[in-house]
Image: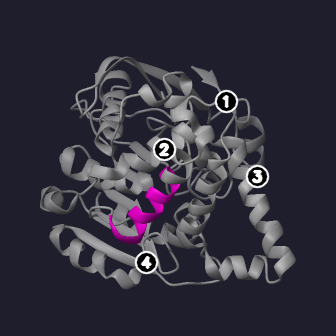
Amino acid sequence: MRTLVCMMMLLANLGWSQSNLKAEESDFVIDNFRFSQGEILPKLNQHYITLGKPIKNSAGKVINAVLIMHGSTGNGGGFLSERFAGVLFGPGQLLDATKYFIILPDAIGHGKSSKPSDGLRMKFPAYTYDDMVKAQYLLLTEHLGVNHLRLVMGTSMGAMFTWVWGYTYPDYMDALMPLASLPVEIGGRNRMLRKMIIDGIKNDPEWRDGNYVAQPPGITTAINSLLVMVSSPLQWQKAAPTREQAEKFLQEQIDRYRKSLDANDMIYVFDASRYYNPDPHLALIKAPLFAINSADDQVNPPELGIMEQEIKKVSRGRYILLPITDETRGHGTHSIPKIWSNYLAELLKASE
């Protein structure tokens, strides 16, 4: 394993000691990984970051492992920000990394895990959320030796993974916290926006069936749809109340995304949810589950009334809707634990 270089600055900012906390990143190569659609990849790379060390009880069961999963186009390293790690992972905090073994994987198609832009382009297997969760499960069980999780938590796409984890491996965890999600098939406006992202790229002649030399202009069209998808009307109005400010803000967002996104990767990322549908399986979830959404989330708007009905199917489930405040950031509220950490504390206590 190689220690993350950037952690030295991060730990200093958070007041953490290098002597008792190191974030390490590594890779687990899965041979002949079989995808749910039948395709096989000879070598699937599952990248991950860990903090802390696993602890086992007298029966050999790991009792302190925490899995945290990122959202679409993100990566596990995103959780090492001061806004997230600085609130949760420090000494005495809820997920103190000197006490917990924290695992931050890059999902298939993201970060340093295997993805289309590595070389296969549109010949890369058409992965689904089930495949992404399966790869993470193999990472934990076959590589890291984690036979139980204290907590499964995720943001956005990672929140949807959390539901999948809950019913696919119902005895594997003590608690579940999906942040910014709905446990139903992705339809309506959500799927429409995802298709706009996909079509915005595929309809561009410069995409060339995925064989472009430079990123095709259609990626900007896709980014425009993504920005609408995750927008926060209140916060964006406050940040850019004039025409000039709004246009400058928009261009800054586009430029930021263009620096990190690949067109083929985006197609796969936003189509991976096509078969996601926890609804028929919710009764299989055994662990206490706190589902947290924000009232200003444009991806999972509360007026749909979906979560109120679905959470009834989870025997130990609870739904928390965070009100709009000056601190919420729409869909992005999922990555601001100071807003919802009190519910995490409650969940950890309830699942002891």
Residue type at mark 1 is Leu
Quarter of the view holding residue 184 = bottom left
Q: Please name the residue shown 25% across and 32% down the image.
A: 58
Is residue 283 visible in the rendered structure shown here? yes
Residue corresponding to mark 4: 301
Q: Is mark 4 on a helix, strand or loop?
A: loop
Residue corresponding to mark 3: 255
Q: Does label 1 or label 2 sit earlier along the sequence?
A: 1
User: Is residue 8 positioned above or below 287 on the image?
Assistant: above
Which region shows up in magenta? 187-198
Q: Position of residue 243 (x, y in %)?
A: 82, 80
Number of numbered discs: 4
Residue type at mark 2 is Ile
10 Å neighbourhood of mark 3: few (<14), some, or many (≥20)?
few
Q: Residue furthest front?
A: 205
206 and 127: which is toward the camera:
206
Residue type at mark 3 is Asp
Residue corresponding to mark 2: 267
Q: Position of residue 239 (x, y in %)?
A: 77, 76
Q: Where is residue 157 in the image (x, y as percent from the top left)?
A: 43, 53
Is residue 49 visible in the rendered structure shown here? no
Q: In which quarter of the image is the N terminus?
A: top right
Q: What element carries label 2?
A: helix
